[in-house]
Structure formats: structure tokens, C-alpha cells
């Protein structure tokens, strides 16, 4: 049996493709859910850190530091395997979504904080002189300016989250990697793993190029100002 038959067996790939697509669907669902929840929670964390009462600020800082330091795999294992000992049991999908969202939120909060702090304080003072409330100032004045700085790193974090969905296979979630691993064991051929790698590439490569484009646009905008 030559290398082509071992790693690129067309017959095995065709038979495993429907299974891989089901795994890809689960991966997409997990990635989108984690990004949505993590982004919203991260923005709230950012506001808590910047504008909350001192105790809330300290709690937000502690959360951000802890979850930026912990590997996602450790968080996932703690949620899925440790929490049942205190009566909290979650499905593999829920556990993976929680782990990915909690870690993404910490990184999102830091990106949003950095973006908001690039806006000159005079913008806040001008908004206050116009009688705008805090949330009106954020929505109409601050965030539209900060978002140009925030988008490239936020997009990069989203790509990392999609890649980290592969860790869900550790808790037996039938994501793309888990389905590929099970299929290669069933068919005694590694081609399904190659197929999964190709699907990951096709999914994430356009997003990688998008990050490069956004970073270039952001740099040009800063030079323009």
C-alpha cells in the first residue's frame, strides 16, 4: 500500500465525508455560540473593569487575569469533569461552549478596553456637554471610533476560538475532529483525519486572510490620521 492509499484514499474519503460534514456542523454551531456569548460577556466585563465600582473593577480584573492565564483545555476539563462533584453537570456541548466563551470573554474584554482607551477623553467631555447619557456616548461617540482598532484583534480571537473547538473532542462532543478520529478508527485509515484538516483549512483560511486585510486597513487609517 503506497502513501496515497494510506493518507489520501478517495474511497475512504467519500464514505467518511457525510460523517465529517455532521461534525463540521457541530463545530460551526459550537464556534458561533461561543463567539456570540463570549463577545457579549467580554464587552460587559470591559465596562465593569473601566466604569464599575471599585469592588466590581477588581473582580473583573481578577476574572480577566485568571482566564487569560488558564489553558482552555484545563477550563473545559474542570467544567465537564469537576463540577459534577458539586452537583453541576453539563452536556459536552454546553461544557465546551462555557469553556470557550469564558476564555474568549477575558481576551475580548482586554481588546475592548484597549480600543476604548484610544478614544481621546475630550470626546467624552464633548458628549457630556451635549447632554448625552453614558450609554448614548458609548453607542454614538466612543464605540464607532474604537471599533476600528478593535476589529482586527477581535477577528483574530474569533479564529482562535474556532480552532479551539477541536478541544471539545476531549469531552466526547461529536465535533469535526471527534468524528474524523472515530471514522479513521472504524475504517482503519487516516484519510478522514486528512479530510478534517482540509475542512478546517477551508473554513479558517478566508478568515485568516480577512484578519490580514483588516490589520492593513487599520494601519492605513491610523497613518491617515
Image (cartoon, rainbow, N blue to C red):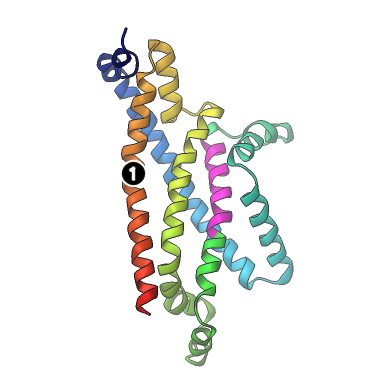
Q: Is residue 190 above or below residue 208?
A: above
Hey, which residue is sitting farthest top in the picture? 1
193 is higher (above) or lower (below) than 186: below
Camera-side residue of 185 and 31: 185
Q: Residue at x 40, y 10 (%)?
A: 188
Part of the protein shown in magenta: 93-108
Residue 187, quarter of the rendered image = top left
User: Which residue sits at x=70%, y=57%?
Assistant: 62
- Is 50 located above or below residue 165 in the figure? below
Residue furthest front as drawn? 2
Q: Residue at x 64, y 38 (%)?
A: 74
Confirm whether the magenta stretch covers residue 32.
Answer: no
Q: Position of residue 39 (x, y in %)?
A: 49, 56
Q: Please indicate whether residue 26 sits to the left or right of residue 98 in the image.
A: left
Residue tagged by mark 1? 205
Residue 104 is a magenta residue: yes
Q: Quadrant of the C terminus?
A: bottom left
Q: Quadrant of residue 174?
A: top left
**Is 32 located above or below residue 58 in the figure?**
above
Does dot 1 land on a helix, a strand or a loop? helix
Magenta stretch secondary structure, dominant? helix
* Mark 1 neighbour density, 10 Å: few (under 14) some (14–19) many (20 or more): few
In the rendered view of the protein, which quadrant contains the N terminus? top left
Number of numbered tags placed on the structure image? 1
Q: Position of residue 172 (x, y in %)?
A: 52, 26
Measured from the top left, where is residue 69 in percent x and y? Answer: 65, 49
Q: Which x, y percent locates residue 133?
A: 52, 82
Amino acid at each position: 500500500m503506497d502513501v496515497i492509499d494510506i493518507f489520501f484514499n478517495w474511497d475512504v474519503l467519500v464514505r467518511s465525508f457525510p460523517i465529517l460534514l455532521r461534525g463540521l456542523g457541530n463545530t460551526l454551531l459550537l464556534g458561533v455560540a461561543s463567539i456570540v456569548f463570549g463577545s457579549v460577556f467580554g464587552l460587559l466585563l470591559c465596562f465593569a473593569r473601566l466604569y464599575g465600582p471599585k469592588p466590581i473593577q477588581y473582580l473583573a480584573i481578577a476574572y480577566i487575569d485568571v482566564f487569560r492565564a488558564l489553558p482552555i483545555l484545563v477550563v473545559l476539563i474542570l467544567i465537564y469533569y469537576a463540577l459534577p462533584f458539586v452537583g453541576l453537570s453539563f452536556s459536552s456541548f454546553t461544557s465546551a461552549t462555557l469553556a470557550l466563551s469564558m476564555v474568549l470573554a477575558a481576551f475580548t474584554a482586554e481588546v475592548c478596553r484597549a480600543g476604548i482607551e484610544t478614544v481621546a477623553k475630550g470626546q467624552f467631555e464633548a458628549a457630556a456637554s451635549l447632554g448625552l447619557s453614558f450609554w448614548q456616548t458609548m453607542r454614538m461617540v466612543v464605540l464607532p471610533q474604537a471599533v476600528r482598532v478593535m476589529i482586527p484583534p477581535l477577528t483574530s480571537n474569533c479564529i482562535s476560538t474556532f480552532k479551539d473547538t477541536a478541544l471539545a473532542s476531549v469531552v466526547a462532543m461529536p465535533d469535526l475532529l471527534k468524528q474524523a478520529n472515530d471514522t479513521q478508527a472504524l475504517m482503519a485509515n487516516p484519510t478522514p483525519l486528512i479530510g478534517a484538516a482540509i475542512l478546517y483549512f477551508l473554513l479558517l483560511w478566508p478568515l485568516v486572510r480577512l484578519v490580514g486585510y483588516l490589520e492593513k486597513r487599520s494601519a492605513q487609517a491610523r497613518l491617515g490620521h
